[in-house]
Image (tube, helix red, strand yellow):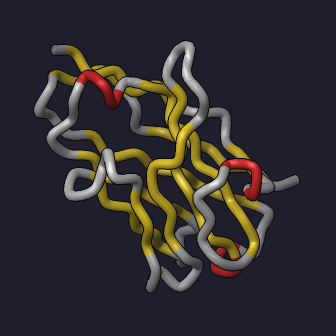
Amino acid sequence: QVQLVESGGGLVQAGGSLRLSCAASKLRFSSYAMGWFRQAPGKEREFVAAISGSAITTRYADAVKGRFTISRDNAKNTVYLQMISLKPEDTAVYYCAAVLGATRTSYSDYAYWGQGTQVTVSS
């Protein structure tokens, strides 16, 4: 079955950087838009960024614009989230997800999900 496996999370100081990766298998990767979502303790899962299958279109939540960059390598079936200028409020479990067709910002639209990777930003 389809698998999405995130990696790259960890503990970083405020102002630091991390790059998350999500490797996909068992799907026609370039046909799927990929998204990153995050969920902090006691909060709902929220949209972070999305990228179209061709990588032409990207979308970002206002809270991360200018600090996070989503990209993908279709030859490697991998999507990335480069995060800079991290803030304590970025602390959350980060999930990657796949949806067939165009980019989406609602988590309910996504068919496949990874298990998540913890990002903790200390002040």
Outermost residue toward the left?
15
Residue at (72% x, 65% y) in the render: 99
Q: Is residue 17 left or right of residue 78?
A: left
Residue at (15% x, 25% y) in the render: 14
Q: Where residue 12 appears, x then y in whole percent?
A: 22, 24
Q: Where residue 39 appears, x then y in whole percent?
A: 54, 29
Q: Where residue 75 appears, x then y in whole percent?
A: 53, 77
In the image, residue 73 above or below residue 56: above
Q: Nearer the viewer, residue 44 or 83?
A: 44
In the image, residue 7 above or below residue 90: below
Q: Is residue 52 left or right of residue 31?
A: left
Q: Where residue 55 appears, x then y in whole percent?
A: 47, 80
Q: Is residue 14 left or right of residue 38?
A: left
Residue at (37% x, 24% y) in the render: 91
Q: How many marks?
A: 0
Q: Quadrant of residue 115?
A: top right
Q: Nearer the viewer, residue 112 or 67?
A: 67
Q: Quadrant of residue 24?
A: bottom right
